Amino acid sequence: LNDLFAIDQHDKWLRFGLGLHTGIEPFSGRIMWIRVWHSNRNPQLILNYYLDTIAELGHMPLITQSDLGTENYGIANAQTLLRQRYDPTLQGTLQHRWMRTKKNIMPEITWSQLRRRFTPGFENLLDEGVIEGWYDSGDTLQMMVFRWVFIPWLQRELDAYRDRVNNSAKRRDRNKVLPHGVPNLIYNSPEDFGSLDFKVSIDREGIDYVRNVYIDASNPVFDIVPPMLGNFIEHCYDAMGRPAVTRTSVWTVYRNVLSAVQ
């Protein structure tokens, strides 16, 4: 356990202007994060997902693993720097494993399950807005309002999906060598499943150090929309009485916010 975290991006929603990203602990099958944003190609953004996760855990895996995309350089560098900080004997070694495409199996499985269990309903809903002519990702203002309304709601839905997966026993698979059971239970009590835990304890100082080296907090990739526009949209949303965003209301809220902003 915690031998590695495997990370991967998912581009199937880029046509809506949305990029998905995940990190998996393969031994337990636990989804460490699954995030939606307006990008999944920025190394600082991807690194931020990782640092948020390990900061919350208080530990990190021995290595990280990804395909060869430049968006993963941030994690590769930060993982290596952090591991060397806690174990100076690792100086001069890379603590990240680069995988050829389609060899980074675990996240691929997560994406295929997401496409089966989660995406169909949401994809149909997103498509509805495009088909009805409410949303054109080539229209900058529409895209900004779409991001502002949809991303926080979709993230809440993805968090709920992650919790469901992490708290449900996997179907038995005769070919699987890894333990069967509930990912969270395996992750939190590996000894009950006959496993060693290789986690490396980390402290706040280490995380802050790496953030300062590799992340520029003022990078616009971290803004859901440009701040001035965000404040204006927020003001319009307040004036509407801050209606709840749900599966049934999301397009109505989007259209009302858009017309208020226009």
Image: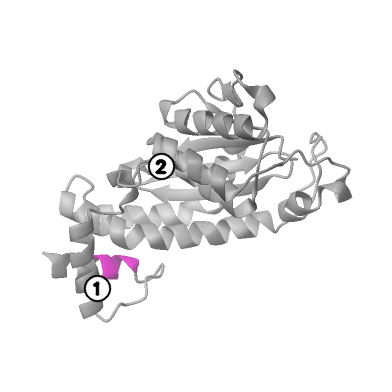
- Side (left or right) of 226 relative to 246: left
Residue 52: x %, y % from top left: 52, 50
Asked if residue 114 shows in the view, the reply is: no
Q: Secondary structure at mark 2?
A: helix
Q: Is residue 184 above or below residue 95?
A: below
Q: Secondary structure at mark 1?
A: helix
- Side (left or right) of 102 relative to 226: right
- Residue under label 2, please give it: 45
* Numbered label attached to residue 17: none
Task: Look at the magenta stretch and give its main secondary structure.
Answer: helix
Please identify the quarter of the rendering in which residue 109 is found. Answer: top right
* Amino acid type of the residue that numbered disc 1 sits on in the rendered structure: Tyr
Residue 121: x %, y % from top left: 46, 57
Asked if residue 190 shows in the view, the reply is: yes
Precedes in sequence: disc 1 or disc 2: 2
Residue 215: x %, y % from top left: 40, 40
Q: Is residue 89 above or below residue 166?
A: above
Magenta extent:
250-254
Q: Quick one: 163 or 138, which is closer to the camera?
A: 163
Q: Residue at coordinates 74% horizontally, 49% vertically from top-left?
A: 187
* Amino acid type of the residue that numbered disc 2 sits on in the rendered structure: Leu
